[in-house]
Image: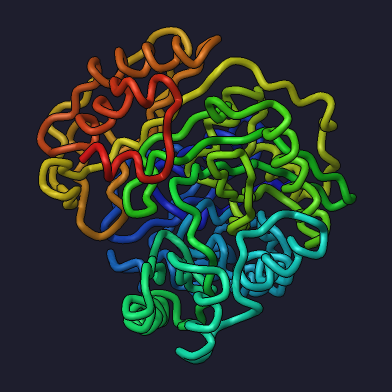
């Protein structure tokens, strides 16, 4: 087992990893930018090392500075968390070439599943359903038009690299398609350094359901059931839950089993998430895989009782999974709300500022993962997420009631937050009845 781990991240996920390491008897080294200097969670690490100025390109994305910190901190392994360098295959290679175990998959597996085009190819090979899409990348306008005429409009233009909705456009006719392929490619090139695109048939009114998987270095792969992430705005998730409401058990099992087949075929180990679209007839289609721990991983932890961060560390150290598929039992219902420093009344614009008061709800089955506190300043440099509020109850109805109570109880003053829109979602009769899809929030607004 590792003696000391460097956490190549910040904020909530850095604190989450520090806590897991402490419980495992593993020392920790935290890195921070000048913007995060003095953050209380840094005091919980055994050592904290500054790696640069506020800009992430000069700190949290600076591979040489992170490796230098690993040398100074005398660590065995590096945990990337999520975001920043978590899905950077080059970073994984550099870590291992410098004899630090990267707590994640191999660079080859990461590159294979991280590229949507190659991931689709693997999925097709092992019989995982995919949205009808182009045969490889689209390089000319005529290729795009030929595909659209074949499958019919609307079609979805997607960047081969990246995520978060960038490099993604919907075209409902040929004129829109001509414009959209250029816009999507340019946006993807600017965001990810890769302008490659491909096309898919656009599924109208789908749900976004993802399967959590974890695999070890001995060939064992299990799923930890599914999460429904349909409550999203511009591809940014606001509410996540498990189990997916109004989804037949047979569909849930088939979707999760398809995810494990894909992961095995990719020779993948560590935690990962396989994402699907589910149509109104419960047909599901693979869309992409995230080769890292997800922001919403606590939803799965609550319904399975499995600590995913500790499991990641065990797997990276070469340990076999401490459980088999039949040991993983889904209990109750869990809901997560991402509390963001945003103003829902003004197009969700970021709302940086200092939190003057913060009262966190509690009670049976309530969890709040956050590094923020009264007096904490949410800056404009990084992600606007303040924390993740979660509830776990015996039934979905009870979980909804619990979350509504918690959102009303929470007090964050000094800045605007996403809480008002999350209350509207939870109190909506359609949400409460499970009549949801990825367009839910846009329609509500």
Tell which of 434 and 366 is nearer to you. Answer: 434
Place of residue 440 in the rendered image (x, y in percent of width and height, measured from the top left): 34, 39
Looking at the picture, how far across and down is residue 59, in whole percent? Answer: 38, 68
Residue placed at 80% from the left, 51% from the top?
261
Query: Looking at this view, is 417 or 234 the one in front?
Result: 234
Identified at 39% across, 39% down, the residue is 231
In the picture shown, does residue 275 fall above or below 68?
above
- From the viewer's perspective, tell me whether residue 48 is left or right of residue 73: left
Q: Position of residue 45 (x, y in %)?
A: 48, 42
Locate residue 6 relative to residue 188 in the image: left or right.
right
When asked about the image quadrant of residue 269, the answer is bottom right
Q: Is residue 96 visible?
A: no
On the question of residue 33 being in view, the answer is: yes
Q: Is residue 183 above or below residue 87?
A: below
Q: Quadrant of the N terminus?
A: top right
Q: Position of residue 225 (x, y in %)?
A: 67, 33
Decide: is 272 above or below 288. Answer: above
Q: Residue at x 32, y 82 (%)?
A: 179
User: What residue do we see at 51% from left, 23% from top?
Assistant: 334
Decide if residue 284 is on the left or right side of residue 382. right
Would you place residue 80 above or below residue 21 in this image?
below
Residue 289 occupies which quadrant of the picture? bottom right
Quarter containing the C terminus: top left
């Amino acid at each position: 087992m590792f003696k000391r781990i460097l956490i190549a991240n910040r904020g909530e996920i850095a604190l989450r990893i520090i806590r897991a390491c402490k419980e495992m008897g593993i020392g920790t080294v935290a890195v921070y930018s000048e913007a995060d200097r003095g953050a209380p969670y840094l005091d919980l690490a055994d050592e904290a090392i500054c790696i640069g100025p506020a800009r992430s390109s000069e700190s949290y994305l600076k591979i040489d500075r992170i490796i230098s910190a690993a040398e100074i901190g005398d660590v065995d392994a590096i945990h990337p968390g999520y975001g920043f360098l978590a899905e950077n295959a080059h970073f994984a290679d550099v870590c291992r070439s410098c004899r630090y175990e990267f707590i994640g998959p191999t660079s080859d597996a990461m590159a294979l599943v991280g590229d949507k085009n190659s991931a689709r190819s693997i999925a097709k090979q092992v019989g995982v359903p995919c949205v009808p899409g182009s045969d490889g990348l689209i390089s000319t306008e005529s290729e795009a038009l030929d595909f659209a005429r074949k499958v019919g409009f609307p079609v979805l233009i997607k960047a081969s690299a990246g995520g978060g909705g960038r490099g993604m456009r919907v075209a409902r006719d040929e004129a829109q398609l001509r414009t959209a392929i250029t816009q999507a490619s340019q946006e993807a090139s600017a965001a990810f350094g890769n302008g490659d695109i491909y096309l898919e048939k656009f599924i109208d009114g789908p749900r976004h359901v993802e399967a959590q998987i974890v695999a070890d270095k001995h060939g064992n792969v299990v799923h930890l059931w599914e999460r429904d992430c349909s409550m999203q705005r511009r591809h940014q998730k606001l509410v996540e839950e498990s189990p997916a409401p109004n989804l037949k058990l047979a569909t849930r099992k088939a979707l999760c089993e398809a995810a494990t087949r894909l992961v095995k075929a990719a020779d993948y180990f560590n935690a990962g998430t396989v994402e699907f679209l589910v149509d109104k007839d419960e047909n599901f289609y693979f869309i992409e895989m995230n080769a890292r721990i997800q922001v919403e991983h606590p939803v799965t932890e609550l319904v399975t009782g499995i600590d995913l961060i500790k499991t990641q560390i065990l797997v990276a150290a070469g340990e076999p999974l401490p459980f088999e598929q039949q040991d993983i039992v889904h209990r109750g219902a869990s809901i997560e709300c991402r509390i963001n420093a945003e103003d829902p009344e003004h197009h969700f614009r970021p709302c940086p500022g200092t939190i003057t008061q913060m009262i966190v709800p509690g009670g049976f089955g309530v969890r709040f993962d956050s590094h923020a506190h009264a007096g904490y300043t949410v800056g404009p440099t990084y992600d606007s997420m303040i924390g993740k509020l979660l509830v776990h109850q015996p039934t979905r109805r009870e979980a909804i009631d619990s979350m509504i109570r918690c959102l009303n109880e929470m007090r964050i003053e000094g800045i605007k937050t996403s809480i008002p829109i999350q209350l509207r979602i939870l109190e909506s009769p359609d949400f409460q009845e499970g009549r949801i899809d990825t367009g839910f929030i846009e329609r509500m607004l």
